[in-house]
Structures are given as structure tokens and as C-alpha cells.
Image (cartoon, grey):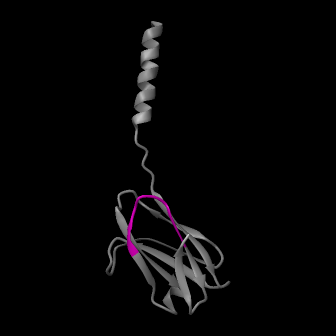
């Protein structure tokens, strides 16, 4: 094999590898800064109405967690709840464009809480 042929093959392989698009799902990170011992949860939904849930996670304070948002979802809604909605039913955010990782955090107590962006 000639040296120039070998160089052409290597160049072709490198070029095709650099043009390959890598698609990865995005994460919604949740920082759980609510009063110690309080449970929080987040649900991801496709619609602003009932149903369409495709991801859900929860944890006791002060443990963080994340939801995976698939690449084939272009926008979504998030329902945030404390102790499965004992205090308020939930706080809904959205529509949120699925263009990268997101981060939110709970602050407050069981009966008086809010969600903020990181």
C-alpha cells in the first residue's frame, strides 16, 4: 500500500468520525434544600394537562436527584411537589425547551416552599 493511500484512508476516517453527531439525553438536576426530613418529588410531563408523564423522581431532603429528558422530547413541563402534595398540590413550570441540562432547587418548609432556578 502506498503511503499516500494510507494517508488518504486515515484522513477519510478522521473526517467521517468528526462529522458524526453525538446525541445525548439531557438532565434536569434537582437540589433538595427544603427543611430536613421533608420529601420532595418532580414529574416531567409532555402536556400541560393531565397525563403525559414520562419521568419522575423524589428524595428526602437534603439529597439531590435528577430526571432524564430524552432527546426526542422537544419541550416538557415539570411538576414540583413537597410530601406528595400535602401542602400545595404542585408547582408547574413550562413549557421548557429541551435544549440542554437544567437545574432547579427547592427552598422552604413543608407548608411554605418555592422552586428556583440554580
Please determine whether, in this image, residue 63 is positioned above or below residue 2.
Answer: below
Residue pictured at 61% horizontal, 71% vertical: 64
Please determine whether, in this image, residue 114 is positioned above or below residue 72.
Answer: below
Chain part drawn in magenta: 94-104
Please determine whether, in this image, residue 15 is positioned above or below residue 75.
Answer: above
In the rendered image, residue 57, in percent from the top left (x then y), is placed at 52, 73
In the rendered image, residue 118, in percent from the top left (x then y), is placed at 56, 69
Specify whether 12 is left or right of 62: left
Tell me if residue 98 is in the magenta stretch: yes
Specify whether 9 is left or right of 50: right
Residue pictured at 42% horizontal, 49% vertical: 23
In the rendered image, residue 43, in percent from the top left (x then y), is placed at 45, 75
Please determine whether, in this image, residue 20 is positioned above or below residue 59.
Answer: above
Residue pictured at 33% horizontal, 81% vertical: 50
Is most of the magenta stretch helix, strand or loop?
strand
Query: Which quadrant: the N terminus?
Result: top left
Residue 29 location, quadrant: bottom right
Residue pictured at 53% horizontal, 83% vertical: 114
Viewer-proximal residue, 40 or 117?
A: 117
Report the number of discs: 0
Amino acid at each position: 500500500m502506498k503511503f499516500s493511500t494510507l494517508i488518504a484512508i486515515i484522513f477519510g476516517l478522521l473526517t467521517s468520525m468528526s462529522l458524526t453527531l453525538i446525541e445525548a439525553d439531557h438532565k434536569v438536576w434537582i437540589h433538595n434544600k427544603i427543611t430536613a426530613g421533608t420529601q420532595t418529588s418532580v414529574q416531567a410531563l409532555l402536556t400541560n394537562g393531565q397525563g403525559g408523564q414520562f419521568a419522575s423522581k423524589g428524595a428526602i431532603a437534603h439529597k439531590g436527584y435528577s430526571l432524564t429528558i430524552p432527546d426526542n422530547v422537544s419541550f416538557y413541563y415539570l411538576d414540583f411537589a413537597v410530601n406528595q402534595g400535602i401542602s400545595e398540590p404542585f408547582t408547574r413550570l413550562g413549557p421548557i425547551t429541551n435544549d440542554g441540562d437544567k437545574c432547579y432547587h427547592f427552598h422552604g418548609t413543608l407548608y411554605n416552599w418555592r422552586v428556583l432556578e440554580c
